[in-house]
Amino acid sequence: MKPTEKHIEEFAANGAVCLRGVLSSDDLEQLGRGVDKDIAEPGPLHTLQQGEQDEGFFLTDFCLAQRLPEVRQFVVASPAAEVAASLLGSARINFFYDALWAKGQSTPKRTRWHQDQPYYPVNGQQFCVLWFPLDPVAKPSCLELIAGSHLWGRWFQPELSQAGQDLYADTAAMERLPDIESERDKYEILSWDMEPGDCIAFHGLTVHGAPGNAASDRARRAVSTFWMGDDTVFAERPGTVRPLFEGHRLEFGDPMDCGYFPRIWPQTEGEDPAQAARFTDPDFRISI
Ligand SMILES: O=C(O)CCC(=O)C(=O)O
């Protein structure tokens, strides 16, 4: 399924759009297999987000595509990169990374409100996230996004997700996010009832968060994939970014277009992005 003109307009105006039936059953099956492997044996970058006293199960993990061939194949062969190219109006699309957000049934812990791009060393308008749920998700458990917040021209200080401290020690460098949760009625908050195969596409500066999965009697597994278009460049931040990618040899201002952040769209005959430096280079290092 390709985004229509209407989807593209909605994405530009709201910074978020829900696309139905993007993935085939094969794409879903492949991604689901990788995710279940990861949940059974999480990678070195995983975090259990619920505290010892908290109820439920909330696992985050990063860079599954690095370790799990199923997820890598999903990244390089599913329609995700092409969807990102249409929404961003970009001639090329490079892959940044992927993240797992798995909440067990009856898990009350929220994903805090935040913007994604301030965490990353990436400037440019053509940056988007595609969020794919692997389970049916009713609105009370769905990702929530503030319509139009990508156009506010504001960059908010990222927080470390478990502890809630500022990521950047220089607190003047970015403003503090308002307390959205206590003033929800001030904002137009978008969320949807979703089925596996649907996706929410959102801009890197769209403010978003997610309720817990308390209202649900099933798990809510979701994967975010992060995509960069023509105008994205490697950027300096006022501290150590998260996740921290090392070994890519980019200088500040360089386009985010190299084998380390492989070009997935358009696909070039004879080239297999699954063999790009990102997935094979021994210099690849990432930490959180
Ligand atoms: O699924 C979630 O709980 C949150 C996803 C998210 O915040 C993201 O993809 O940046």
Image (cartoon, grey):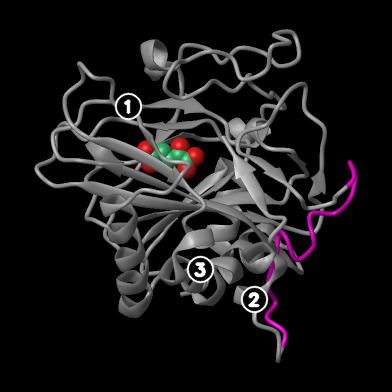
Residue 157 image-quadrant placement: top right
Q: Are marks 2 and 3 in contact (CB under 8 Å)?
A: no
In the displayed structure, does residue 115 sit left or right of residue 263? left
Tell me residue 15's x, y (percent): 57, 43
Q: Amino acid at mark 3?
A: Arg
- Callout 1 amino acid: Arg
Q: Residue at the bottom extreme?
A: 270
Question: How crowded is the residue under tag 3: few (<14 C-alpha within 10 Å), some, or many (20+)?
Answer: many
Residue drawn where x is 69% and y is 71% of the image = 276
Q: Dominant secondary structure of the magenta stretch?
A: loop
User: Residue 5 appears at what percent x and percent y?
Assistant: 58, 65
Cα separation between marks 3 and 1: 28 Å
Q: Is residue 94 a member of the stretch shown in magenta? A: no
Region in magenta: 251-268
Which residue is the site of mark 3? Answer: 72
Label 2 Cα crowd, 10 Å radius (few <14 / some 14-19 / many 20+): few
Q: Position of residue 225 (x, y in %)?
A: 52, 55
Q: Earlier in the sequence, mark 2 or mark 3?
A: 3
Return the mark for residue 275: 2
Observer-side mark, 2 or 1, equals 2
Q: x, y (%) of residue 241? A: 68, 31
Q: Residues within 10 Å of mark 1 (few under 14, many from 20)?
A: some
Q: Earlier in the sequence, mark 3 or mark 1?
A: 3
Identify the secondary structure beneath mark 1: loop
Answer left or right for 194 relative to 53: right
Instruction: Find disc 1 in the rendering and name its residue.
Output: 110
